[in-house]
Image (spheres, helix red, strand yellow):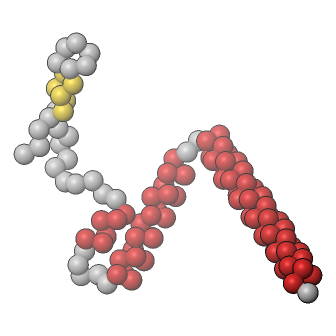
Amino acid sequence: MKLPAVSGSSGKLTVARPSKEEGEAWYPGRVFGDETLSYEEAMVQYVADSDVKTSNIEAEMSPEAAERKRAKEEKGAALRRAEEELKVQRRQVREQRQQEDSEWQGQWAE
């Protein structure tokens, strides 16, 4: 039996009734509890269920919220591209310095 939620932070006791739904909440990962499915089948079902949930959330968004989300995703993608470019530049500098160092050590070894 599930006990009702109780809150006393407002100064008076408030008891929230349990929800009428006795079943457990649905989420995409529950598919892995089905022992009749192989791992591959469960993973395919998980991906499909996750996509449905995401598309439902996006369908319920207002146009302004959807635009903000797209702008945020584009900004994130631009930041990831810039980060990758910086990694490539640092790698090139590091390789150049290693080359210069090996040449310098070669000169002093002679």
> Height in image: 97 above or below 17?
below
For this orientation, the residue located farthest to the left is 1
Residue 39: tell me if it is visible. Answer: yes
> Height in image: 100 above or below 21?
below
> Height in image: 39 above or below 12?
below
For this orientation, the residue located farthest to the top is 11
Residue 74: tell me if it is visible. Answer: no
Residue 85: give x, y in percent of width and height. 79, 64
Quarter holding residue 19: top left
Residue 82: give x, y in percent of width and height. 78, 58
Quarter holding residue 9: top left
Q: Is residue 6 left or right of residue 54?
A: left
> Height in image: 6 above or below 97?
above
**83 and 72: which is toward the camera:** 83
Q: Give the residue displayed 45% in from the left and 70% down from the top.
A: 47
Q: Give the residue displayed 55% in from the left and 45% down from the top.
A: 61
- Label total for image: 0
Q: Give the residue displayed 22% in from the left and 54% down from the top.
A: 24
Quarter holding residue 31: bottom left
**75 and 68: which is toward the camera:** 75
Residue 51: give x, y in percent of width and height. 49, 64
Quarter of the image that includes the N terminus = top left
Q: Give the residue displayed 85% in from the left and 71% down from the top.
A: 97
For this orientation, the residue located farthest to the bottom is 110
**48 and 79: which is toward the camera:** 79
